Image: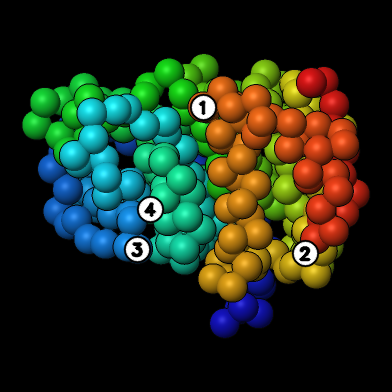
Amino acid sequence: MKRKLASIMTAALILTPALSANISTVNAAYQPYSVSSASDTVSLAEYDDGLLIDHVVFYPKEMTTSNKKYPVVVWGNGTTVSWDVYEELLSQIAAAGYIVVANTDRFCGTGITESASVDFIIKEGNDKKSLFYNKVDAEHIGASGHSQGGMSAVNAARRNPKIDCVFDIQGCDLSSEASQLKVPTFFVTATDDQIVFSPLVKASYNACKAPCVYASLKNITHFGPVDNSSASLFSEYAVKWFDAFLKNDNAAKKVFLNGGKLSKDSRWTDYSSKNF
């Protein structure tokens, strides 16, 4: 299965922009057609937008009885795969106190649909009939994604000024796109990735003029984020990144600075940071 996914994703990467550019979404408030448990502490609401692209939202179960608002993370999928293969990873992020908005776009590289997810959840947060009414912290929104979804996160941040930071997992980014980023971005890669090679990701980091970090997970392939046994390796620092820039947690920010926890973590290599 992994070999099949690898060949499909490799072949599809170069087709991404043309395919994604033809996808549009219309955002309005909808009632979820399904609400289920993603974990002991996280629920999952699935929406039918009536279009090609639908939304799925992970959120802490405590949200329904809480009086507070939750920061948002929008998510982009890898080439040809859907949100459900990332369920463990997205559940772990949501469990840390985030509303995580994914969608069903399998060719999302332009960032159009991930940017639309921002507009979708903000409208939900303003609709008195919505499950998310008055629960969405629209002033604190991050973008993330894997592979082509990492590219999507970068491009969504370029498109949508409401996005405050990016956590780019093994993204097949263009340096020209990364150079236009204006928000803090973590470029994550993996030493055993044979689809999106680490030097390509490092080139995007080098081109980025915003505060940014680069680091590579040791002994992890391109499919680490969809492997439940290694999902926590990604979510651990994703949560810290979002805590730093969406919850204004100074202790979390220090994790990413030179001399901080990430730079000393033996599970990672080739750490770099700049512009902080």
Identified at 26% across, 62% down, the residue is 37
Is 182 drawn above or below residue 224 in the view shown? above
Task: Name the mark on residue 104.
Answer: 4
Residue located beneath label 3 in the image: 39
Residue 193: assigned label: 2
The kind of residue tagged 4 is Thr
Relative placement, left or right, of 155 versus 64 is right
Q: Percent position (x, y) of residue 60?
A: 33, 47
Q: CA distance from mark 3 to mark 1?
A: 23 Å
Q: Is residue 53 among the parts visible in the rendering?
A: no
Q: Residue 174 or 232: which is nearer the viewer?
A: 232
Q: Which residue is mark 1?
A: 247
Q: Residue at x 13, y 43 (%)?
A: 31
Mark 4 closeness class: few <14, some 14–19, many ≥20 residues within 10 Å: some
Give neighbour class at mark 2: few <14, some 14-19, many 20+ (Cα, 10 Å): some
Which comes before the other along the chain, label 4 or label 3? Answer: 3
Q: Position of residue 268 (x, y in %)?
A: 82, 56
What colour scheme has been applied to the protein in the rendered image? Answer: rainbow
Is mark 3 in CB contact (under 8 Å) with mark 1?
A: no
**Labels 1, 2: front one:** 1
Q: Secondary structure at mark 2?
A: loop
Apparent side of residue 150 relative to residue 213 in the rendered image (left or right): left
Amino acid beneath label 3: Ser
Q: Looking at the image, do the residues carrying marks 4 and 3 touch, with CB atoms under 8 Å apart?
A: no
Mark 4 or mark 1, which is nearer the start of the sequence? 4
Of callouts 3 and 2, the N-terminal one: 3
